[in-house]
Image (tube, coloured by chain):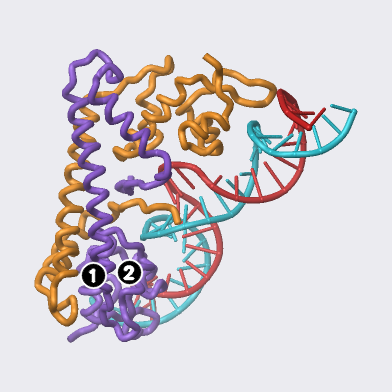
Chain colours: A purple, B orange, C red, D cyan
Amino acid sequence: MKSLDIGEVAKRSGVPASTLRFYEEKGLIRSIGRRGLRRLFDHGVLERLALIAVGRAAGFTLEEIARMFTPQGGLRIDRRMLVAKADELDATIRKLTAMRDGLRHAAACRAPSHMECPSFRRIVRAAAAHVIGEPNRKLRRNRH
Amino acid sequence: MKSLDIGEVAKRSGVPASTLRFYEEKGLIRSIGRRGLRRLFDHGVLERLALIAVGRAAGFTLEEIARMFTPQGGLRIDRRMLVAKADELDATIRKLTAMRDGLRHAAACRAPSHMECPSFRRIVRAAAAHVIGEPNRKLRRNRH
DNA sequence: GTGCCACTTCAAGTCGACTTGAGGTCAAGA
DNA sequence: TCTTGACCTCAAGTCGACTTGAAGTGGCAC
């Protein structure tokens, strides 16, 4: 198996070289050596990057993900942790679903102004009730 | 109607005073005057804050929300914008749902290691496919 | 051998939404 | 009158995940 240089890994994984260096610095991936200054990666790094992508998509932080890898390079994922994250996703999904329905209603409603639309007023009240005690759950947005 | 001082608004809305000052600076809310140095707010600010909360929950940025208010204090929400946001939420919901199901499967699976679990491998592959062209959609997390 | 350009390091910048801190003001209750 | 503490301003800091820039190195095709 030939080793890959950083540009090759970037091309195959879709992850920018700057990010790969950043991930290495954070201990999320490892290079198997150098050719001169240049990092060399094993093919296994591609699967590792895929795992990192799953973790990110599921809402884990990079630090949490780092803790799921053993120093030997294996995986150590607590099943309870998966369940907990699934439950968390569930809650988020329910909230987003309610919001989506509210938005669709409001968009369809023919009241002259939104504040005269009963369903719009309903989601405003619901959201207002949620503010207290839930100061800052947010959706990350696409860059640019 | 008595006007409210910033502490009163904070207490009733659950939004910290520092945030209220920040929102005023950004043009999201307005104070109706001062008593000495202190801001005075109209009761209407509470509804306005509720609207801001809805917008945030639906995934709009503060800047986008600011643009939904007319200089006169009214609402000017493009219905197509609501539909677009609802569609966006839909896509997010679908993705999160797939991820949640994958996590639940992986948690329930009795394979000795996760990488030997077919459903886990499936979500890893799916996520890997998503990395390309979608570099950075993320879930905001609760603060501490 | 030589030139190019993909790589290297390290520090600093970015984004959004706020928070925090220092240093100051002042309305109102005792 | 004095004290208190809630308010004020303005600048800077925070968080997570990267990106960007400057300045330098060296592998490899010609």
In the displayed structure, does residue A22 sit left or right of residue D12?
left
Work out whether mark 1 precedes mark 2 in sequence or the reverse, and give the earlier one.
1
Could you tell me which residue is drawn at 15 percent across and 70 percent down?
B108
Place of residue A68 in the rendered image (x, y in percent of width and height, measured from the top left): 31, 74
Is residue A98 placed above or below A38 in the rendered structure? above
Q: Nearer the viewer, residue A31 or B2?
A: B2
Could you tell me which residue is drawn at 24 percent across and 13 percent down?
A112
Crowding near pointer 2: few (<14 within 10 Å), some, many (20+)? some
Crowding near pointer 1: few (<14 within 10 Å), some, many (20+)? many
In the structure shown, which secondary structural element does the residue marked by tag 2 occupy?
helix
Res B68 quadrant in image: top left
Q: What quarter of the picture does the C terminus of chain B occupy? A: bottom left
Could you tell me which residue is drawn at 18 percent across and 38 percent down?
B87
The residue that label 2 is drawn on is A65
Tell me how far mark 1 sits from mark 2, CA to CA.
9 Å
Q: Nearer the viewer, residue A79 or D13?
A: A79
The residue that label 1 is drawn on is A51
User: Which residue reaches farthest left?
Assistant: B118
In the rendering, which numbered label is found on residue A27?
Answer: none
Res A42 quadrant in image: bottom left
Disc 2 marks which amino acid? Ile
Is residue A41 placed above or below A54 in the rendered structure? below
The chain containing the residue under callout 2 comes to: A
Res B101 quadrant in image: bottom left
In the structure shown, which secondary structural element does the residue marked by tag 1 occupy?
helix
Place of residue D25 in the rendered image (x, y in percent of width and height, measured from the top left): 45, 79
Disc 1 marks which amino acid? Leu
Does the CB distance between marks 1 and 2 fall below 8 Å? yes
The chain containing the residue under callout 1 comes to: A
